[in-house]
Amino acid sequence: MNNAVAEQKPILECRDLRKAFGAFEVLRSISFEMQAGVVLSVIGASGSGKSTLLRCLNYLEQPSSGVVFLDGEPIGLRRQADGGLKPDSPANIARMRAQIGMVFQQFNLWPHMSALENVIEAPRQVKGLKRAEAIEIGRHYLGKVNLLDKADAYPARLSGGQQQRVAIARALAMQPKVMLFDEATSALDPELTGEVLDVMRALAEEGTTMVVVTHEMRFARDVSDRVMFLHQGVIEEDGAPAQVFGNPASERCRAFLSSVAH
């Protein structure tokens, strides 16, 4: 956990974010900001809007209204001379999205590519890096997730935990400003969950800015700088882990934590 985050402008900011699918409003007026180096865990029951929030943060889902800012720059919108905002170009949206790493529940690795080839594909295609430079970066991040010895292995030869660690290395290889984790361990057998959480803990200790949607309450309590509880698309609780887990103000948060207590 990074306990020495300096006062600075937010690296990530949501202003009145809303997302509806038809008449169903999944996110309702979500507003928060976070500084670089912070680990924010987002908890809540299934259907509370957690994954939709992550997908709106990197514009995989276009918000119905509201704005997300990355390092002061709006995502999906472009500032006009008069101060207003209008929809941005696909190329600029892709440029912004490349600065936000995303790790999904499913690993989504290319089956015909080795672990290293999976990791270097985006730096080569999106950033235009030469192969030698991309390989150097890819090997560095495979080392970070303790898989350098599996650089030439194909996904079918890797365990689920190893595949997810390759997916983390792939996201890190783009050297993003923020890392998003959407239930990164939920598709894993319990014995493989620990190895992925260990990598996430190490990233947190290094000061990686992370938004983590998780059902791993111990991770949220022990590793996060901040915990946010969502209920029906609204932030019901937001604070330090000790406060959220020890003395939540929200009755719904208390009931949720009681229901998931082991």
Image (tube, helix red, strand yellow):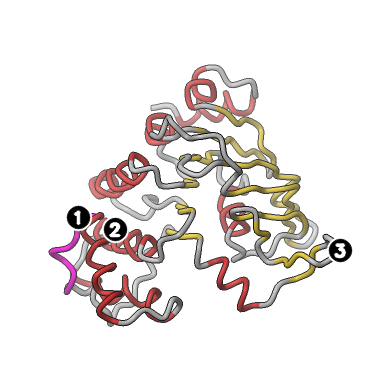
Mark 1 to mark 3: distance in Å? 50 Å
Q: Which residues are magenta?
A: 145-152
- Amino acid carrying label 1: it is Asn
Q: Residues within 10 Å of mark 1 (few under 14, many from 20)?
A: some
Q: Report whether 163 appears left or right of 15.
A: left
Question: Helix, strand or loop at disc 3?
Answer: loop
| Residue extending furthest toward the right | 82
The answer to whether 158 is drawn above or below residue 260 in the figure is below
**131 relative to 41 in the view: left or right:** left
Asked if the residues shown at circle 1 and circle 3 are in contact, with their CB atoms under 8 angstroms apart, the answer is: no
Q: What label does residue 146 carry, if any?
A: 1
Name which residue lies at 76% across and 64% down: 79
Q: Which residue type does callout 2 highlight?
A: Arg
| Residue 27 drawn at (x, y percent) | 70, 49
Name the element at disc 2. helix
In front: label 1 or label 3: 3
Residue that lies at the very extreme toward the left in this rendered image: 149
Q: Position of residue 186 (x, y in %)?
A: 39, 51
Q: Residue at x 60, y 44 (%)?
A: 10
Residue at the disc numbered 2 = 165
Check disc 3 and report the residue beneath it. 82
Q: Crowding at label 2, few (<14), some or many (≥20) Cα neighbours within 10 Å?
A: many
**Amino acid under disc 3:** Asp
70 up-or-down from 220: above or below: below
* Of the two numbered discs 1 and 2 in the rendering, the one whose residue sits closer to the viewer: 1
Residue 111 painted magenta: no
Residue 94: image quadrant is bottom right
Of labels 1 and 2, earlier in sequence is 1
Say which of 144 and 153 sits in front. Answer: 144
**Image quarter hosting the C terminus:** top left
Spatial separation of the CA atoms under disc 1 and disc 2? 8 Å
